[in-house]
Protein backbone atom coordinates (compact mmCIF):
# COMPACT_ATOMS: atom_id res chain seq x y z
CA UNK A 1 0.00 0.00 0.00
CA UNK A 2 1.26 3.49 -0.85
CA UNK A 3 2.24 5.50 2.23
CA UNK A 4 0.57 8.84 2.95
CA UNK A 5 -0.31 11.15 5.82
CA UNK A 6 -3.68 12.89 6.05
CA UNK A 7 -5.08 15.45 8.46
CA UNK A 8 -8.89 15.52 8.62
CA UNK A 9 -10.76 18.41 10.22
CA UNK A 10 -8.21 19.24 12.95
CA UNK A 11 -9.33 21.81 15.51
CA UNK A 12 -7.34 23.02 18.52
CA UNK A 13 -7.99 25.86 20.99
CA UNK A 14 -6.04 27.31 23.91
CA UNK A 15 -7.41 29.80 26.46
CA UNK A 16 -8.23 32.93 24.47
CA UNK A 17 -6.82 31.55 21.19
CA UNK A 18 -8.25 29.35 18.43
CA UNK A 19 -4.97 27.85 17.22
CA UNK A 20 -6.30 25.56 14.46
CA UNK A 21 -9.57 25.70 12.55
CA UNK A 22 -10.69 22.69 10.51
CA UNK A 23 -7.28 21.81 9.03
CA UNK A 24 -7.46 19.17 6.29
CA UNK A 25 -4.78 18.17 3.77
CA UNK A 26 -2.83 15.15 2.56
CA UNK A 27 0.95 14.61 2.24
CA UNK A 28 2.12 11.87 -0.12
CA UNK A 29 5.08 9.52 0.22
CA UNK A 30 8.23 10.36 -1.71
CA UNK A 31 7.32 14.05 -1.61
CA UNK A 32 8.25 17.08 0.51
CA UNK A 33 5.30 19.16 1.66
CA UNK A 34 6.19 22.59 3.10
CA UNK A 35 4.10 24.31 5.76
CA UNK A 36 4.31 28.08 5.48
CA UNK A 37 2.79 30.86 7.55
CA UNK A 38 3.49 33.72 9.94
CA UNK A 39 4.51 33.05 13.54
CA UNK A 40 1.39 32.01 15.41
CA UNK A 41 -0.33 30.74 12.25
CA UNK A 42 -0.68 27.23 13.75
CA UNK A 43 2.13 25.28 12.07
CA UNK A 44 3.94 24.23 15.25
CA UNK A 45 0.65 23.37 16.97
CA UNK A 46 -0.18 20.98 14.14
CA UNK A 47 3.25 19.35 14.38
CA UNK A 48 2.81 18.88 18.13
CA UNK A 49 -0.49 17.10 17.48
CA UNK A 50 1.25 14.92 14.89
CA UNK A 51 4.01 14.12 17.41
CA UNK A 52 1.60 13.21 20.20
CA UNK A 53 2.63 16.17 22.38
CA UNK A 54 -0.84 17.71 22.07
CA UNK A 55 -4.28 16.22 21.52
CA UNK A 56 -6.60 17.74 18.92
CA UNK A 57 -9.98 18.96 20.14
CA UNK A 58 -11.58 17.54 16.99
CA UNK A 59 -10.44 15.72 13.88
CA UNK A 60 -8.17 12.79 13.12
CA UNK A 61 -4.81 11.80 11.69
CA UNK A 62 -4.73 9.04 9.07
CA UNK A 63 -1.56 7.10 8.17
CA UNK A 64 -1.88 5.03 5.01
CA UNK A 65 -5.60 4.50 5.53
CA UNK A 66 -5.41 3.79 9.27
CA UNK A 67 -6.78 6.33 11.75
CA UNK A 68 -4.25 7.03 14.50
CA UNK A 69 -4.65 8.23 18.06
CA UNK A 70 -1.37 9.45 19.49
CA UNK A 71 -1.65 9.86 23.26
CA UNK A 72 2.08 10.47 23.67
CA UNK A 73 5.26 10.99 21.61
CA UNK A 74 6.03 7.31 22.20
CA UNK A 75 2.82 6.36 20.36
CA UNK A 76 3.81 8.54 17.38
CA UNK A 77 7.34 7.08 17.23
CA UNK A 78 5.92 3.53 17.34
CA UNK A 79 3.67 4.41 14.39
CA UNK A 80 6.66 5.62 12.38
CA UNK A 81 6.34 9.38 12.94
CA UNK A 82 9.28 11.57 13.93
CA UNK A 83 9.10 15.33 14.51
CA UNK A 84 12.24 17.46 14.85
CA UNK A 85 11.31 20.63 16.65
CA UNK A 86 12.92 24.04 16.44
CA UNK A 87 13.33 23.76 20.25
CA UNK A 88 15.91 21.06 20.85
CA UNK A 89 14.70 17.84 22.50
CA UNK A 90 18.07 16.74 23.85
CA UNK A 91 19.54 15.44 27.10
CA UNK A 92 22.44 17.88 27.52
CA UNK A 93 24.36 15.91 30.17
CA UNK A 94 24.38 12.74 28.05
CA UNK A 95 26.76 12.02 25.17
CA UNK A 96 26.06 12.43 21.48
CA UNK A 97 25.83 8.66 20.97
CA UNK A 98 23.51 8.22 23.98
CA UNK A 99 21.20 10.94 22.64
CA UNK A 100 21.09 9.44 19.13
CA UNK A 101 20.24 5.92 20.31
CA UNK A 102 18.19 6.87 23.39
CA UNK A 103 15.63 4.16 24.11
CA UNK A 104 17.44 1.59 21.97
CA UNK A 105 21.00 1.44 23.32
CA UNK A 106 22.83 -1.72 22.13
CA UNK A 107 23.41 -4.20 24.93
CA UNK A 108 25.62 -7.19 25.60
CA UNK A 109 24.23 -10.60 26.61
CA UNK A 110 24.90 -9.61 30.22
CA UNK A 111 22.48 -6.71 29.85
CA UNK A 112 25.12 -4.01 30.09
CA UNK A 113 25.40 -1.36 27.39
CA UNK A 114 27.74 -2.37 24.56
CA UNK A 115 29.79 0.84 24.47
CA UNK A 116 32.07 -0.29 21.63
CA UNK A 117 29.14 -1.02 19.36
CA UNK A 118 27.38 2.18 20.49
CA UNK A 119 30.42 4.25 19.54
CA UNK A 120 30.89 2.38 16.24
CA UNK A 121 27.25 2.83 15.20
CA UNK A 122 27.33 6.51 16.20
CA UNK A 123 30.55 7.13 14.25
CA UNK A 124 29.03 5.53 11.16
CA UNK A 125 26.06 7.88 11.34
CA UNK A 126 28.20 10.95 12.14
CA UNK A 127 30.45 10.16 9.17
CA UNK A 128 27.38 9.92 6.92
CA UNK A 129 26.49 13.46 8.01
CA UNK A 130 30.11 14.59 7.60
CA UNK A 131 30.32 16.20 11.05
CA UNK A 132 33.44 16.78 13.19
CA UNK A 133 31.82 15.48 16.38
CA UNK A 134 33.18 13.04 18.97
CA UNK A 135 30.39 10.56 19.87
CA UNK A 136 31.40 10.70 23.55
CA UNK A 137 30.99 14.50 23.86
CA UNK A 138 28.12 15.62 26.12
CA UNK A 139 25.53 17.25 23.85
CA UNK A 140 25.27 20.26 26.15
CA UNK A 141 28.84 21.22 25.18
CA UNK A 142 28.03 21.37 21.46
CA UNK A 143 27.04 24.50 19.57
CA UNK A 144 23.35 25.07 18.88
CA UNK A 145 23.97 24.05 15.25
CA UNK A 146 25.51 20.72 16.20
CA UNK A 147 22.78 20.06 18.77
CA UNK A 148 20.30 20.45 15.92
CA UNK A 149 22.28 17.98 13.81
CA UNK A 150 22.19 15.44 16.67
CA UNK A 151 18.40 15.75 16.67
CA UNK A 152 18.29 15.16 12.92
CA UNK A 153 20.62 12.14 13.16
CA UNK A 154 18.38 10.66 15.85
CA UNK A 155 15.28 10.97 13.66
CA UNK A 156 17.13 9.64 10.61
CA UNK A 157 18.36 6.58 12.51
CA UNK A 158 14.85 5.73 13.73
CA UNK A 159 13.85 5.06 10.11
CA UNK A 160 10.49 6.82 10.47
CA UNK A 161 8.10 6.77 7.51
CA UNK A 162 6.86 10.30 8.28
CA UNK A 163 9.48 12.90 9.22
CA UNK A 164 8.60 16.50 10.03
CA UNK A 165 11.19 19.27 10.32
CA UNK A 166 10.37 22.50 12.18
CA UNK A 167 12.85 25.21 11.11
CA UNK A 168 15.74 22.70 10.85
CA UNK A 169 18.23 25.10 9.24
CA UNK A 170 17.80 28.09 11.55
CA UNK A 171 21.18 27.47 13.20
CA UNK A 172 23.00 25.44 10.52
CA UNK A 173 25.91 26.48 8.32
CA UNK A 174 25.70 26.30 4.51
CA UNK A 175 27.66 23.01 4.48
CA UNK A 176 25.34 21.49 7.09
CA UNK A 177 22.28 22.66 5.15
CA UNK A 178 23.68 21.01 2.00
CA UNK A 179 24.12 17.75 3.95
CA UNK A 180 20.58 17.98 5.33
CA UNK A 181 19.05 18.60 1.91
CA UNK A 182 20.95 15.62 0.49
CA UNK A 183 19.54 13.42 3.27
CA UNK A 184 16.02 14.72 2.62
CA UNK A 185 16.55 13.82 -1.05
CA UNK A 186 17.51 10.31 0.07
CA UNK A 187 14.35 10.15 2.20
CA UNK A 188 12.22 11.08 -0.81
CA UNK A 189 13.81 8.32 -2.90
CA UNK A 190 13.17 5.86 -0.06
CA UNK A 191 9.46 6.77 -0.17
CA UNK A 192 9.32 8.72 3.10
CA UNK A 193 6.73 11.43 3.68
CA UNK A 194 8.49 14.67 4.59
CA UNK A 195 6.87 17.72 6.19
CA UNK A 196 9.11 20.80 6.13
CA UNK A 197 8.51 24.05 8.03
CA UNK A 198 10.69 27.05 7.26
CA UNK A 199 10.44 30.82 6.99
CA UNK A 200 13.25 30.87 4.41
CA UNK A 201 11.43 31.03 1.10
CA UNK A 202 14.52 30.15 -0.93
CA UNK A 203 14.68 26.81 0.93
CA UNK A 204 11.00 26.17 0.31
CA UNK A 205 11.49 26.55 -3.43
CA UNK A 206 14.67 24.47 -3.38
CA UNK A 207 13.37 21.46 -1.50
CA UNK A 208 9.56 21.19 -1.54
CA UNK A 209 7.07 19.70 -3.99
CA UNK A 210 3.90 21.19 -2.50
CA UNK A 211 3.22 24.13 -0.18
CA UNK A 212 0.38 24.50 2.33
CA UNK A 213 -0.08 28.08 3.58
CA UNK A 214 -1.54 28.79 7.04
CA UNK A 215 -2.88 32.11 8.33
CA UNK A 216 -4.44 32.67 11.77
CA UNK A 217 -4.97 28.94 12.31
CA UNK A 218 -6.63 28.31 8.95
CA UNK A 219 -5.42 26.67 5.75
CA UNK A 220 -5.70 29.44 3.17
CA UNK A 221 -3.93 27.95 0.15
CA UNK A 222 -2.42 24.74 -1.24
CA UNK A 223 0.09 25.25 -4.05
CA UNK A 224 2.40 23.26 -6.29
CA UNK A 225 5.89 24.67 -5.68
CA UNK A 226 6.84 24.85 -9.35
CA UNK A 227 3.69 26.83 -10.19
CA UNK A 228 4.00 29.71 -7.69
CA UNK A 229 6.44 32.48 -6.71
CA UNK A 230 7.57 34.36 -3.61
CA UNK A 231 5.13 37.22 -4.11
CA UNK A 232 2.11 34.91 -4.15
CA UNK A 233 3.33 33.10 -1.03
CA UNK A 234 3.95 36.30 0.92
CA UNK A 235 0.55 37.67 -0.09
CA UNK A 236 -1.12 34.46 1.11
CA UNK A 237 0.84 34.44 4.39
CA UNK A 238 0.54 38.02 5.54
CA UNK A 239 -2.47 39.22 3.58
CA UNK A 240 -0.58 42.27 2.33
CA UNK A 241 2.23 43.23 -0.02
CA UNK A 242 5.36 44.02 2.04
CA UNK A 243 7.17 45.25 -1.08
CA UNK A 244 10.93 45.76 -1.08
CA UNK A 245 11.49 45.29 2.65
CA UNK A 246 14.89 46.95 2.93
CA UNK A 247 14.25 49.80 0.48
CA UNK A 248 11.16 50.77 2.47
CA UNK A 249 12.94 51.02 5.83
CA UNK A 250 12.78 54.42 7.51
CA UNK A 251 16.31 54.90 8.83
CA UNK A 252 18.59 57.60 10.14
CA UNK A 253 21.49 58.43 7.84
CA UNK A 254 23.15 60.75 10.37
CA UNK A 255 25.16 59.26 13.21
CA UNK A 256 26.48 60.90 16.36
CA UNK A 257 29.83 60.71 18.07
CA UNK A 258 31.57 57.45 18.94
CA UNK A 259 29.53 55.63 21.57
CA UNK A 260 31.43 52.38 21.99
CA UNK A 261 35.04 51.54 21.22
CA UNK A 262 36.60 48.12 21.67
CA UNK A 263 40.38 47.74 21.43
CA UNK A 264 42.37 44.51 21.07
CA UNK A 265 39.78 42.30 22.75
CA UNK A 266 41.07 38.81 23.53
CA UNK A 267 39.05 35.94 25.03
CA UNK A 268 38.41 32.27 24.26
CA UNK A 269 37.55 32.16 20.52
CA UNK A 270 38.09 35.96 20.27
CA UNK A 271 41.40 37.01 18.72
CA UNK A 272 42.52 40.64 19.17
CA UNK A 273 39.26 42.22 18.02
CA UNK A 274 38.82 45.99 17.64
CA UNK A 275 35.75 47.88 16.43
CA UNK A 276 33.72 51.03 17.06
CA UNK A 277 30.06 52.03 17.17
CA UNK A 278 28.55 55.52 16.88
CA UNK A 279 25.33 56.84 18.41
CA UNK A 280 22.42 56.01 16.14
CA UNK A 281 24.49 53.58 14.07
CA UNK A 282 23.76 49.95 13.24
CA UNK A 283 26.80 47.72 12.85
CA UNK A 284 26.68 44.03 12.05
CA UNK A 285 28.97 41.09 12.71
CA UNK A 286 28.74 38.77 9.70
CA UNK A 287 30.42 35.41 9.23
CA UNK A 288 29.89 31.68 9.05
CA UNK A 289 28.50 29.63 11.94
CA UNK A 290 31.25 29.22 14.53
CA UNK A 291 33.20 32.29 13.35
CA UNK A 292 33.15 33.87 16.83
CA UNK A 293 30.45 36.52 16.41
CA UNK A 294 28.44 35.44 19.47
CA UNK A 295 31.59 35.05 21.54
CA UNK A 296 32.55 38.70 20.86
CA UNK A 297 29.22 40.10 22.06
CA UNK A 298 29.05 37.77 25.07
CA UNK A 299 32.37 39.19 26.26
CA UNK A 300 31.11 42.70 25.57
CA UNK A 301 28.00 41.98 27.67
CA UNK A 302 30.00 40.55 30.59
CA UNK A 303 28.59 37.04 30.10
CA UNK A 304 32.10 35.69 29.33
CA UNK A 305 35.41 36.91 30.72
CA UNK A 306 37.94 38.67 28.52
CA UNK A 307 41.64 37.80 28.74
CA UNK A 308 42.83 41.26 27.70
CA UNK A 309 41.72 44.36 25.83
CA UNK A 310 39.91 47.62 26.48
CA UNK A 311 36.26 48.68 26.24
CA UNK A 312 35.26 52.36 26.20
CA UNK A 313 31.65 53.52 26.56
CA UNK A 314 31.08 57.22 25.83
CA UNK A 315 34.83 57.75 26.12
CA UNK A 316 35.09 56.16 29.57
CA UNK A 317 36.89 52.85 30.06
CA UNK A 318 34.57 50.19 31.48
CA UNK A 319 34.98 46.64 32.77
CA UNK A 320 31.93 44.38 32.86
CA UNK A 321 32.41 41.45 35.22
CA UNK A 322 28.82 40.32 34.79
CA UNK A 323 25.75 41.02 32.64
CA UNK A 324 24.30 43.11 35.48
CA UNK A 325 27.34 45.43 35.22
CA UNK A 326 26.64 45.83 31.50
CA UNK A 327 22.93 46.49 32.02
CA UNK A 328 23.69 49.09 34.72
CA UNK A 329 25.95 50.85 32.18
CA UNK A 330 23.24 50.78 29.48
CA UNK A 331 24.28 47.74 27.42
CA UNK A 332 21.60 45.11 26.65
CA UNK A 333 21.71 41.76 24.86
CA UNK A 334 18.99 39.80 23.08
CA UNK A 335 20.76 36.40 22.89
CA UNK A 336 20.77 33.93 20.02
CA UNK A 337 19.17 31.18 22.11
CA UNK A 338 16.18 33.12 23.40
CA UNK A 339 14.57 30.09 25.06
CA UNK A 340 17.61 29.02 27.08
CA UNK A 341 19.29 32.37 27.72
CA UNK A 342 16.75 35.11 27.08
CA UNK A 343 13.46 34.09 28.65
CA UNK A 344 11.95 32.43 31.70
CA UNK A 345 9.56 30.29 29.69
CA UNK A 346 7.16 29.29 32.46
CA UNK A 347 6.68 32.84 33.67
CA UNK A 348 4.31 35.42 32.23
CA UNK A 349 4.95 38.13 29.68
CA UNK A 350 4.60 40.64 32.50
CA UNK A 351 7.24 38.96 34.69
CA UNK A 352 9.69 38.54 31.81
CA UNK A 353 9.52 42.18 30.81
CA UNK A 354 9.98 43.54 34.34
CA UNK A 355 13.05 41.43 35.26
CA UNK A 356 15.74 44.13 34.84
CA UNK A 357 13.71 46.88 36.55
CA UNK A 358 12.29 45.11 39.61
CA UNK A 359 14.26 47.36 41.96
CA UNK A 360 12.64 50.40 40.32
CA UNK A 361 9.16 48.94 40.74
CA UNK A 362 9.30 48.57 44.52
CA UNK A 363 7.00 50.55 46.79
CA UNK A 364 8.42 50.16 50.25
CA UNK A 365 8.93 46.38 50.50
CA UNK A 366 6.32 45.47 47.87
CA UNK A 367 6.28 45.29 44.07
CA UNK A 368 4.11 47.84 42.29
CA UNK A 369 2.06 45.34 40.29
CA UNK A 370 0.02 48.03 38.58
CA UNK A 371 3.12 49.72 37.11
CA UNK A 372 4.61 46.33 36.23
CA UNK A 373 1.46 45.39 34.30
CA UNK A 374 1.48 48.75 32.49
CA UNK A 375 5.07 48.16 31.31
CA UNK A 376 4.00 44.82 29.86
CA UNK A 377 0.83 46.25 28.29
CA UNK A 378 2.85 49.05 26.69
CA UNK A 379 5.25 46.48 25.19
CA UNK A 380 2.35 44.35 23.91
CA UNK A 381 0.86 47.40 22.18
CA UNK A 382 4.17 48.82 20.94
CA UNK A 383 5.40 45.57 19.39
CA UNK A 384 2.00 44.06 18.47
CA UNK A 385 2.61 40.94 20.57
CA UNK A 386 -0.17 38.46 19.84
CA UNK A 387 -1.55 37.46 23.24
CA UNK A 388 -4.90 37.52 25.05
CA UNK A 389 -3.20 39.22 28.01
CA UNK A 390 0.08 40.03 29.75
CA UNK A 391 -0.40 37.12 32.18
CA UNK A 392 0.03 34.56 29.39
CA UNK A 393 3.05 32.28 29.90
CA UNK A 394 5.89 33.05 27.49
CA UNK A 395 6.38 29.42 26.41
CA UNK A 396 2.88 29.50 24.90
CA UNK A 397 3.86 32.30 22.48
CA UNK A 398 5.23 31.83 18.97
CA UNK A 399 8.95 32.42 18.35
CA UNK A 400 8.39 35.85 16.85
CA UNK A 401 6.28 37.00 19.79
CA UNK A 402 8.85 35.65 22.26
CA UNK A 403 11.47 37.77 20.49
CA UNK A 404 9.25 40.83 20.88
CA UNK A 405 8.96 40.15 24.63
CA UNK A 406 12.76 40.37 24.93
CA UNK A 407 12.77 43.64 22.97
CA UNK A 408 10.04 44.94 25.26
CA UNK A 409 12.14 44.09 28.29
CA UNK A 410 15.07 46.24 27.19
CA UNK A 411 13.18 49.18 25.69
CA UNK A 412 10.53 50.01 28.31
CA UNK A 413 10.45 53.50 29.82
CA UNK A 414 12.18 52.32 33.02
CA UNK A 415 15.32 51.32 31.08
CA UNK A 416 18.11 53.54 29.76
CA UNK A 417 19.79 51.62 26.95
CA UNK A 418 22.77 53.04 25.07
CA UNK A 419 23.94 49.90 23.23
CA UNK A 420 21.51 47.19 22.09
CA UNK A 421 23.01 43.87 20.96
CA UNK A 422 20.73 41.67 18.83
CA UNK A 423 22.11 38.16 18.20
CA UNK A 424 20.11 36.43 15.42
CA UNK A 425 16.90 38.36 16.29
CA UNK A 426 15.00 37.06 13.23
CA UNK A 427 15.89 33.38 13.65
CA UNK A 428 12.73 31.31 13.20
CA UNK A 429 10.59 34.36 12.41
CA UNK A 430 8.28 34.72 9.42
CA UNK A 431 8.81 37.26 6.64
CA UNK A 432 6.08 39.61 7.83
CA UNK A 433 7.44 39.78 11.38
CA UNK A 434 10.99 40.09 10.01
CA UNK A 435 9.99 43.30 8.24
CA UNK A 436 8.65 44.60 11.56
CA UNK A 437 11.89 43.69 13.38
CA UNK A 438 14.03 45.42 10.72
CA UNK A 439 12.05 48.63 11.19
CA UNK A 440 12.27 48.29 15.00
CA UNK A 441 16.07 48.09 14.68
CA UNK A 442 16.12 51.24 12.57
CA UNK A 443 13.80 52.97 15.05
CA UNK A 444 16.16 52.14 17.92
CA UNK A 445 19.01 53.73 15.96
CA UNK A 446 16.90 56.83 15.21
CA UNK A 447 16.54 57.27 19.00
CA UNK A 448 20.35 57.49 19.27
CA UNK A 449 20.88 53.91 20.47
CA UNK A 450 23.89 52.13 19.03
CA UNK A 451 22.84 48.73 17.65
CA UNK A 452 25.00 45.64 17.13
CA UNK A 453 23.17 43.22 14.83
CA UNK A 454 24.28 39.63 14.24
CA UNK A 455 22.68 37.52 11.52
CA UNK A 456 23.56 34.47 9.44
CA UNK A 457 21.38 35.76 6.60
CA UNK A 458 23.54 38.02 4.42
CA UNK A 459 20.67 39.81 2.63
CA UNK A 460 19.37 41.18 5.93
CA UNK A 461 22.88 42.09 7.12
CA UNK A 462 23.43 44.09 3.93
CA UNK A 463 19.90 45.53 4.02
CA UNK A 464 19.90 46.69 7.66
CA UNK A 465 23.44 47.49 8.85
CA UNK A 466 25.29 50.76 8.23
CA UNK A 467 28.65 49.02 8.54
CA UNK A 468 29.46 45.32 8.44
CA UNK A 469 32.36 43.78 10.34
CA UNK A 470 33.22 40.36 8.92
CA UNK A 471 34.43 37.73 11.41
CA UNK A 472 36.38 34.55 10.75
CA UNK A 473 38.03 32.30 13.36
CA UNK A 474 37.63 34.94 16.06
CA UNK A 475 39.25 37.70 13.97
CA UNK A 476 37.76 40.68 12.17
CA UNK A 477 38.85 40.23 8.55
CA UNK A 478 37.33 43.41 7.16
CA UNK A 479 34.78 46.20 7.53
CA UNK A 480 32.39 47.16 4.70
CA UNK A 481 29.98 50.09 4.39
CA UNK A 482 26.41 49.21 3.37
CA UNK A 483 26.77 51.07 0.07
CA UNK A 484 29.75 48.90 -0.90
CA UNK A 485 28.49 45.58 0.46
CA UNK A 486 27.62 42.52 -1.58
CA UNK A 487 27.28 38.84 -0.65
CA UNK A 488 30.29 37.70 -2.67
CA UNK A 489 32.63 40.21 -1.03
CA UNK A 490 31.42 39.41 2.49
CA UNK A 491 31.75 35.65 1.94
CA UNK A 492 35.29 36.15 0.63
CA UNK A 493 36.20 37.99 3.85
CA UNK A 494 34.36 35.38 5.93
CA UNK A 495 36.63 32.65 4.56
CA UNK A 496 39.87 34.67 4.60
CA UNK A 497 43.00 33.07 6.07
CA UNK A 498 43.44 34.70 9.50
CA UNK A 499 46.73 33.09 10.51
CA UNK A 500 48.65 36.29 9.74
CA UNK A 501 45.97 38.78 10.81
CA UNK A 502 45.67 40.80 13.97
CA UNK A 503 41.88 41.11 13.97
CA UNK A 504 41.85 44.91 14.26
CA UNK A 505 39.31 47.48 13.15
CA UNK A 506 39.41 47.79 9.36
CA UNK A 507 37.62 51.12 9.24
Image (cartoon, grey):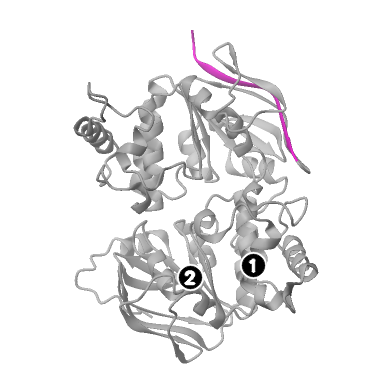
Q: Is residue 35 visible?
A: yes
Residue for point 66% across, 20% down: 60
Does the image show residue 244?
no
> With 96 as the anchor, is 71 left or right in this view?
right
The label on residue 482 is: 2
Q: Is residue 111 above or below residue 415?
A: above
SS assignment at label 1: helix
Residue named by callout 1: 409
Q: Position of residue 173 (x, y in %)?
A: 37, 50
> Where is residue 8 drawn, in percent x and y?
67, 21
Residues at marks 1 and 2, CA–CA distance in whole angstroms = 29 Å
Question: Magenta includes 6?
Answer: yes
Q: Please state the total of marks drawn on the protein image.
A: 2
Q: Nearer the viewer, residue 126 or 463?
A: 126
Residue 249, horizontal then vertical, whole percent: 63, 65
Locate residue 181: give its quadrant: top left
Relative height, residue 415 to residue 7 (above, below): below
In the picture, measured across the screen, residue 49 lies left or right of residue 389, that is left
Q: Quadrant of residue 90?
A: top left
Which residue in the rendered view is the most extreme toward the right?
370
Amino acid sequence: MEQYLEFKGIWKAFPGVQALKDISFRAESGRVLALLGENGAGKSTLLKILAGDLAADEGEIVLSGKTQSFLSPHDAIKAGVSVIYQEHQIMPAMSVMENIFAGALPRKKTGFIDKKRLRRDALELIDKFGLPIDPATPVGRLSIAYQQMVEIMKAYWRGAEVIAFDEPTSSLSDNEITTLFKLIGDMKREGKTVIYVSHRLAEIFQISDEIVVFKDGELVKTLTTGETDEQELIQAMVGRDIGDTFANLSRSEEHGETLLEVKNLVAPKVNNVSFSLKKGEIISFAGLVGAGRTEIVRVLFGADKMTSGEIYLEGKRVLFNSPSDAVDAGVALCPEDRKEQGLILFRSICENISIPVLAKLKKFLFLDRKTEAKLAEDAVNKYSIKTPGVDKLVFELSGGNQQKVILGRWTNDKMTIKVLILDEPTKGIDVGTKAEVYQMICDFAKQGIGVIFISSELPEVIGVADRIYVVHDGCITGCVDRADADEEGILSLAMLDTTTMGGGDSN
